[in-house]
Image (cartoon, rainbow, N blue to C red):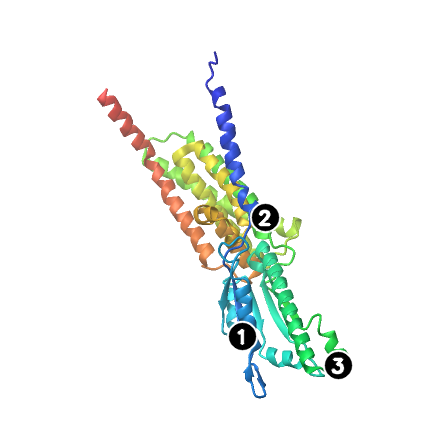
């Protein structure tokens, strides 16, 4: 007869661990974009055709582009959410504000140049494609592939129309005209807010900072839990010392990690001081959050943050529009580390400075909320004492 009941729980525990680590891998395996916001601008002024009026091919192309990508391959939500924008200036501002992953711009002379392809002196029309590379490495690669597919289809349709036009004219085409048949439209691709070769740099800095936060918080908790203080004032002093040491650790970790990334790992850190201060703020916020949980749950709270690491790591590398609905709606919004990655992207790729933006403000509120919960644990000893007294009196 088995006396140790834990042996019976081994299969159950193994299955639970298997389930947890399996579902953390699903987002990185199943990636399908949904409603990826991409801007489209039609600046085409059209061209006057005798007896036919003004022909605006840009409007026709815009309609065809939207129609061709209106549904996803699996019949679900569309992969692209097209946003019609009135000017390139507005598009540029939107990309700098991380509203669009890319943009298609049809120039004002598009119709005029395409009409010239039917003349002895053809001029190739062009379409401008902008990829907002700094928003997300995976998304920017996907947008580039989508743009290539759209461009190839546009070229194919234009080639067919050219051949039909030449056939109607009934004349021999010139050498210049023949050279445009295969690829009549020229594409100009521009990477906006370029990430270069370090598109995943913000994500790669998360894991060491998160682990350092857990270790610092656990050591602080373990070092002070043995200090049995019977008065609230003394317990408050201990808490204040913990916060002070946490702040010192956060500054050291933030600046050290920035130095390692810059000097040892070869990252291109555009603003060393801003990056170091932001990482210090992030680390301080994380240490306070973990310390707040440890102050109430003890070491039992550590697995929560280890699981957050395994759930968060694959999601942080993805754009929200690529996540399965469950992870997008129920997991991603609750991950505090996503604000760290967002803040680093702004510093690295969008020429931003350390300011009171959304990532910074959210991290500060997380720190303040954690600080409140942390200091509330001062009363935990009194609560336990009252509960013990009540139980003793009842007996």
**Closest to the observer: 184 or 8?**
184
Does residue 155 appear left or right of residue 382 in this picture?
right
Q: Name which quarter of the figure residue 300 lies in.
A: top left
Residue 369, numbered label: none
Marks 2 and 3 sit apart, C-alpha to C-alpha, by 60 Å
**Comparing marks 2 and 1, which lies closer to the viewer?**
1
Residue 59, numbered label: 1
Mark toward the start of the polypeptide (2 vs 3): 3
Residue 172, numbered label: 3
| Image location of residue 317, percent across then percent down | 56, 50
- Using the rendered image of the protein, determine whether residue 391 is visible from the camera's viewpoint: yes
The local secondary structure at tag 1 comes to helix
Q: Is 325 situated above or below 180? A: above
| Image location of residue 46, percent across then percent down | 56, 81
Mark toward the start of the polypeptide (2 vs 1): 1
The local secondary structure at tag 3 comes to loop
Identified at 42% across, 48% down, the residue is 366
- Residue furthest out toward the right: 175
Q: Is 88 situated above or below 312? A: below
Q: Is 153 situated above or below 248? A: below
Identified at 53% across, 56% down, the residue is 72
Q: Quadrant of the C terminus?
A: top left
Does residue 345 appear left or right of residue 168 in this picture?
left
Does residue 387 appear left or right of residue 9 in this picture?
left
Identified at 47% across, 16% down, the residue is 4
| Image location of residue 226, percent across then percent down | 42, 29
Does residue 172 appear left or right of residue 241 in this picture?
right
Residue 204, numbered label: 2
- Using the rendered image of the protein, determine whether residue 253 is visible from the camera's viewpoint: no
């Amino acid at each position: 007869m088995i006396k140790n009941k834990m042996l019976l729980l081994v299969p159950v525990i193994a299955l639970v661990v298997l389930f947890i680590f399996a579902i953390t891998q699903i987002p990185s395996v199943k990636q399908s974009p949904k409603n990826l916001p991409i801007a489209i601008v039609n600046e085409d002024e059209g061209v006057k055709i005798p007896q036919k009026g003004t022909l605006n091919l840009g409007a026709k192309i815009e309609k065809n582009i939207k129609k061709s990508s209106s549904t996803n391959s699996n019949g679900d939500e569309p992969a692209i959410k097209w946003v019609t924008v009135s000017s390139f200036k507005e598009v540029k501002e939107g990309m700098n504000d991380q509203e669009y992953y890319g943009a298609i711009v049809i120039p004002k002379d598009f119709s005029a140049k395409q009409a010239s392809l039917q003349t002895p002196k053809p001029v190739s029309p062009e379409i401008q494609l902008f990829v907002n590379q700094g928003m997300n490495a995976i998304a920017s690669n996907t947008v580039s592939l989508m743009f290539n597919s759209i461009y190839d289809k546009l070229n194919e349709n234009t080639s067919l129309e050219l051949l039909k036009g030449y056939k109607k004219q009934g004349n021999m085409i010139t050498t210049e005209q023949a050279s445009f048949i295969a690829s009549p439209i020229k594409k100009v691709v521009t990477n906006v807010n370029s990430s270069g070769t370090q598109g995943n740099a913000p994500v790669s800095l998360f894991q060491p900072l998160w682990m350092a936060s857990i270790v610092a918080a656990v050591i602080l908790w373990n070092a002070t839990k043995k200090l049995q203080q019977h008065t609230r004032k003394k317990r408050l002093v201990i808490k204040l010392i913990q916060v002070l040491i946490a702040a010192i650790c956060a500054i050291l970790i933030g600046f050290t990690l920035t130095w390692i990334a810059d000097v040892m790992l070869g990252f291109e850190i555009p603003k060393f001081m801003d990056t170091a201060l932001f990482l210090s703020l992030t680390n301080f916020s994380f240490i306070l959050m973990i310390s707040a949980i440890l102050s109430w749950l003890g070491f039992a709270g550590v697995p929560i943050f280890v699981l957050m690491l395994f759930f968060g790591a694959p999601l942080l590398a993805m754009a929200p529009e690529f996540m399965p609905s469950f992870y997008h709606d129920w997991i991603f919004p609750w991950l505090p580390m996503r604000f760290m990655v967002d803040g680093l992207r702004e510093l690295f790729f969008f020429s931003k400075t350390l300011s009171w933006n959304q990532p910074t403000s959210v991290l500060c509120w997380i720190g303040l909320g954690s600080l409140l919960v942390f200091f509330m644990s001062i009363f935990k000893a009194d609560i336990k004492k009252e509960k013990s007294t009540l139980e003793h009196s009842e007996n």
